[in-house]
Amino acid sequence: MRPASQTEALVEEVTGLKPTGANFRRILKILGDKKRAELILETFSMLLQSSSVLDQRDYTVGISTCGRSNMWEHSCWLLHMMPKARVAANAFTYNAAIGACHNGGQWQQAMILFEDMQLAKVRPNVILYSAAISACAKGARWQQGLELFEAMQNAEVNPDVICYNAIISACGAGGAWQEALKLFRATTEVTIDPDVVSYSATISACETNGEWRQAFELLEEMQKAEVAPNEFTYGAAISACEKGDQWQQALMLFGTMEARKVNPNVIICSATISACEKGAQWQQGLTLLEAMEEGKACPNVVSYNAAISACEKGGQWEHALILFQAMQTLTLKPDVISYSATISACEKGGEWQQALLFFWVMNEATVKPNVFSFSATISACQIAGEWERAVMLFDIMKQAEVAPDVISYNATMGACGSGNHWQQALTFFAQMTKDDVYPNITSHKAAINACHNSGQWQQVLILCETMPKSPAGHEALSADTWENWRDLLNVALSMPNITG
């Protein structure tokens, strides 16, 4: 810290007030408003050295100001300084400190303070319990939140709607949607009227697990209870539809927002486009993106990624390229999802050269490709019969320490097969299990095709013996690829360890 004289001069310069006990709270407010929370600790130290008398309210204001400035460590330091200044902490100071830890995402520190408070024989009230439970929600520690909620009831502290909202949010953040729904239902038993936050938090909990039907039921209940939904409510409900592959329901909800006078934000629009993408409704996705560009919700990278993915699913590689270029025109920086979806769109459109071009541009843009990027590019090369490029990309993927998945292996083996390089295909097939990638039916078909194309019938029989002993496996063997090998497959399929 600075010498006291320097601190005094700086504080007076920033606040326009002389640092005295009488001006202290006004100084704290000004420092908070001007985002100069780092001066708060120095001001405290300076006044304590000058024997100024500070009380609980002074400390509470200082702790709260630091908390609002995301300086939770400073808040905790002020709380721990109180005993040295012979000032006893009360419920308000602990609430301010726990709230600061919540804002800083420090749920463990919040729980430590909650325990310290009880040791100091400060009886927690409903506000303190809510603050501690909210901290657990931010740390996705819903079990600890439930323990606090139960302890609260055992201590005969009646939870209010804010407390219920906090524990519902904690359960939702932890993926415990059934617990969240149970707690929401419990509000009616204690004659608490759920508010928009209660409904939104419960719908959000359902959204996390794709429980779109539950989300819809809650929206209907909300309407009957005459509780107006907000942007958060709609965003959670539409995301639930997106996760549940219900694009029609997502569009229907989106369409009702105008009547409810709720303006869709970029998150809602992006979730709706993503729902269209999962339903292969690329035209609807593009229409929504255009509406965003014309309206108030400015599309971001997530919005464009969803639209590009919709075009990829719909086999519209040209539209995907146009959208990618539009991103750059808007000075939006494409991420790994943008590149991967565009590469995949080119792959599905048979444009292997475009896919390869985007892959190299991706590297030049210092965007690290992931397994999806590599797999899509390798698949594009496979379709084009560019087996050498496919093998080269697979090697680059390993060198980049990107773990190949079953799709990467299958595409590489397929490429080797199309180039009549059956031995390399079998090498890749054998390598799969060493990399903890387990062959599926497509893997077996790729290896068998490679051997079939090179006339290696003995290898075909060996691979047939390793085929999964399931109806799906036999279906793979009876595909059109084997029309010229019908007799051979009849022999293979008649083996005991194949048909048994």
Image (cartoon, helix red, strand yellow):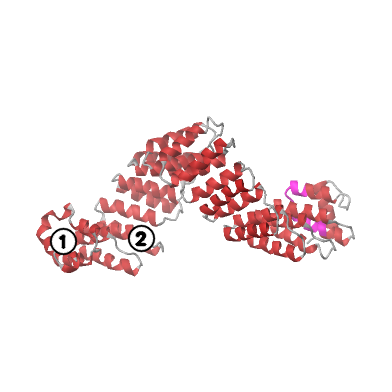
Q: On screen, 489 above or below 36?
A: below
Task: Judge whether residue 104 can be spotted in this image.
Answer: no
**Residue 451 among magenta residues:** no
Q: Please, what is the three-letter code of the amino acid marked with disc 1? A: Ser
Q: What type of secondary structure mainly makes up the magenta span? A: helix
Residue beneath disc 2: 405
Around disc 1, counting alpha carbons within 10 Å, would you say few (fewer than 14), some (14 to 19), or many (20 or more)? some
How far is disc 2 from disc 1 in space, using C-alphas? 26 Å
Residue beneath disc 1: 454
Rendered location of residue 365, percent (x, y) = 45, 51
Q: On screen, 317 above or below 54?
A: above
Disc 2 versus disc 1: nearer the observer: 2
For the magenta stretch, what is the residue range?
30-44
Rendered location of residue 283, percent (x, y) = 38, 35
Q: Which residue shows up at 38% across the image and 54% down it?
A: 372
Task: Judge whether residue 77 can be spotted in this image.
Answer: yes
